[in-house]
Amino acid sequence: MRIAARHRGGWLFSSQIDEARQHQVRINGEWVDVVQMGQGDPLVLVPGLAGGWKLLAPLASQLARHYQVTIPGLRGDRFPMGNSCVSGLGDHAADLSQLIEQLGLERPSLFGVSFGGAIALELAVEQPQRIGALIVQGVVPKFRTNLGTTIARRVLERFPLPTDNGFLNQFFNLLHGGKPEPGPLTDFVVERCWETDQGVMARRIGHLESFDVSDRLWRVDVPTLVLAGTRDSIVPPSRQRALAAEIPGARYATLEGAGHIAFLSHRVEVAQQVRRFLREISHSHC
């Protein structure tokens, strides 16, 4: 069946939305979405800088075959002005801790991607007792700004853009680790990312610029897996390997041919790595 271009992104997403249970939770004065799928041991997925829970839905659908998957929204997703009250990654980590408590999740496994990986790291170094295991992909303990992210932030801050801006679309395409082939996946990424307010994206880039847990990694006191796409041009795999080396007992694994959005483009492989890791640490505790 040939799918019209304007429907491709929705086609990738439609099967996941049908199985999701969505509700809202009030966190620090703002209502945020919480989406849950599946049953089993609790696994919390923390979304990235843009795209919200919908960008993680295809991966969540894979993981929900074995776990109760929870994807929390972030302040600013539903009400962009709410994000102006967030001063940094520490606030997002505190929100996440509060949400875990409100939902009654007992030491869930925590999996953060990109910006969400930074939130997960912040929580893991400050409140390791909240979680049972840590998985991150596309993150480092201290971000280095480059020309691309600086330009993107300035453009987002200063210029109102149409919801299909070529410059930002090219930036989104970098997430694939190379020029992506036109099709449902490319459309899905662009459409979901544009659902995040551009001012919120700019502020979150600013939060990453001041993020640094490099001197606190010794506090991570839970089994940890660092996943890296071999073609990640946003956060090079060598830096993600260095992150794993700094966390006591952490494991490091690569996803061949994957870019920064490995959690989406290589979601089957990511789910397999996560399941293998969680199964192994579960057996080691028996």
Image: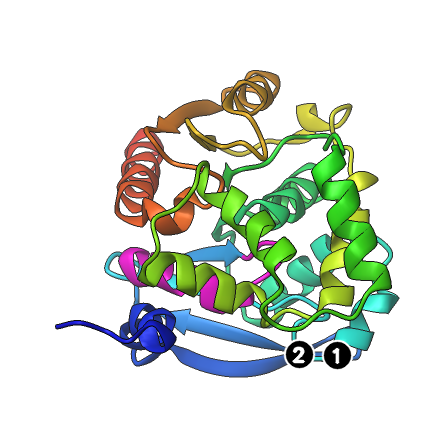
Q: Residue at x 34, y 49 (%)?
A: 181
| Foreground of the two, 125 or 84 | 84
Q: Secondary structure at mark 2?
A: loop
Q: Are marks 2 and 1 in contact (CB under 8 Å)?
A: yes
Question: Looking at this view, is 33 or 190 the one in front?
Answer: 190
Quadrant showing the C terminus: top left
Range covered by the magenta-colored residues: 47-63
- Residue located beneath label 2 in the image: 78
User: How far, Cα to Cα, is label 2 from label 1?
Assistant: 9 Å
Compared across the picture, whether 195 is left or right of 20 comes to: right
Counting from the top left corner in percent of width and height, residue 93 is at: 71, 53
Residue 164 position in % (x across, y down): 58, 68
Q: Is residue 246 above or below residue 259?
A: above
Relative to 199, is 128 on the left or the right? Answer: left
Q: Which residue is mark 1?
A: 30
How far across and down, in percent of the image, does residue 42 sit? 41, 58
- 67 horizontally vs 105: left or right: left
Task: Name the secondary structure under disc 1.
Answer: strand
Q: Which coloring applies here? A: rainbow
Which residue corresponds to the image point at 41% horizontal and 63% vertical from the top-left? Answer: 187
Asked whether 253 falls inside the magenta stretch, the response is no
* Residue 53 is covered by the magenta coloring: yes
Residue 71 seen from this side: no
Front tag of 2 and 1: 2
**Residue 52: image location, x then y, percent:** 56, 65
Q: Magenta: predominant secondary structure element?
A: helix
Could you say which is closer to the camera, residue 50 or residue 210?
50
Crowding at mark 1 (Cα within 10 Å: few <14, some 14-19, many 20+):
some
